[in-house]
Image (tube, helix red, strand yellow):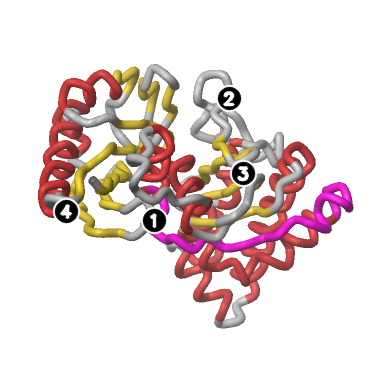
């Protein structure tokens, strides 16, 4: 009997689920509004209903659902599976998500932070395929990240490892929602870019600032060089600690990589050990919005492998 897996990427606005073979082929997908305001139990019920519908469409006489993986935004305590807090899911404080899922699902499942799931997606099917040691930064509304060491995602003592967006790059910088100051998230996220551009362009978005930079407008170009500078500070520290093979940049802001790549590389080289940065490859993520679902499915597959008769994919 062949197996397939479902990877669920839970977001503050929508959730997306992919049905995936052990080789990484996407069989089908579903997307629906999260409606987080209805509370955790209602969100779980909606996800479970979506999973059941997706599984019903994909299941055949020769193919069955083996397990489900979930990527969840926020601070997720492992192995208990408790969402301690999630800025993107209002009211989610100390939510025992694993317990809710056990009561609702009749198949095995895994849980991880959404940025870790996206990192695993790039490991399995994307820009970091074949790599054993790398880290990923997801540059979106905020800045998330994940660290892979010897082919395994780094969770730390309680599952909180990988909060790379809260690496401090300027101790006197603007306050951050985490309670610190000068975090990378305050300089390299889409939200931060829009904030920093406001004196020049008024209320705007990171995408509009990138378009202005490509039109040759000096303030926008300088702003993106500043993004690269602060990214370089953070990446140099991470590179010196982990000695990775590559750095993967994902999220909407990474689509403007050409605008900040020069200052990122310059700062990274100036602040890293030469032998480390000489071999460090900078790459842009390849899986797009499928990264989280693919990574969640991959994690479920690692925890609950297909039967011996079914082929098993390797990253």
In the foreground, 8 or 304: 304
Closer to the N terminus: mark 2 or mark 1? 1
Please give left or right for residue 185 compared with residue 24 in the image.
Answer: right
- Decide if residue 191 is in sight here: no
Q: Does residue 281 belong to the magenta stretch? A: yes
Compared to 183, does 24 lie above or below? below
- Circle 1 is placed at which residue position? 23
For the N terminus, the quadrant is top left
- Circle 4 is placed at which residue position? 58
Neighbourhood count class around disc 2 (C-alpha, 10 Å): few under 14, some 14–19, many 20 upward: few
Residue extent of the magenta highlight: 270-292
Element marked by disc 3: loop
- The residue that appears at 59% across and 29% down in the rendered structure is 180
Mark 4 and mark 3 residues within 8 Å of each other at the beta carbon = no
Closer to the N terminus: mark 4 or mark 3? 4
In the foreground, 260 or 11: 11
Neighbourhood count class around disc 4 (C-alpha, 10 Å): few under 14, some 14–19, many 20 upward: some
Q: Does residue 143 belong to the magenta stretch? A: no
Mark 4 and mark 1 residues within 8 Å of each other at the beta carbon = no
- The residue that appears at 59% across and 55% down in the rendered structure is 130
């Amino acid at each position: 009997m062949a197996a397939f897996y479902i990877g669920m990427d839970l977001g503050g606005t929508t959730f997306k689920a992919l049905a995936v073979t052990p080789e990484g082929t996407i069989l089908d997908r579903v997307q629906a509004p999260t409606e987080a305001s209805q509370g955790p139990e209602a969100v779980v019920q909606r996800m479970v209903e979506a999973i059941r519908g997706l599984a019903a469409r994909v299941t055949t006489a020769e193919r069955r659902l083996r397990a489900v993986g979930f990527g969840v935004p926020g601070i997720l305590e492992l192995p208990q599976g408790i969402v301690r807090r999630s800025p993107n899911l209002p009211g989610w404080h100390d939510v025992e998500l694993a317990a809710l899922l056990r009561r609702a699902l009749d198949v095995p499942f895994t849980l991880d932070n959404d940025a870790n799931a996206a990192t695993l997606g790039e490991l399995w099917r994307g820009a970091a395929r074949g790599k054993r040691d790398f880290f990923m930064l997801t540059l979106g509304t905020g800045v998330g990240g994940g660290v892979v060491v010897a082919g395994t995602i780094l969770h730390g003592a309680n599952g909180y490892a990988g909060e790379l967006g809260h690496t401090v790059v300027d101790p006197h910088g603007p306050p951050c929602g985490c309670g610190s100051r000068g975090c990378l998230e305050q300089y390299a996220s889409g939200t931060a870019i829009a904030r920093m551009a406001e004196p020049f362009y008024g209320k705007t978005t990171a995408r509009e600032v990138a378009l202005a930079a490509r039109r040759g407008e000096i303030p926008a170009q300088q702003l993106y060089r500043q993004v690269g500078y602060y990214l370089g500070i953070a990446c140099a520290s991470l590179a010196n600690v982990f000695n990775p093979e590559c750095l993967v940049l994902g999220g909407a802001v990474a689509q403007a990589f050409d605008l900040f790549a020069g200052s990122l590389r310059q700062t990274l080289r100036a602040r890293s050990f030469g032998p480390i940065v000489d071999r460090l490859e900078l790459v842009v993520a390849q899986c797009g919005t499928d990264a989280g679902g693919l990574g969640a499915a991959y994690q479920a597959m690692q925890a609950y492998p297909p039967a011996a008769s079914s082929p098993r994919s390797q990253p």
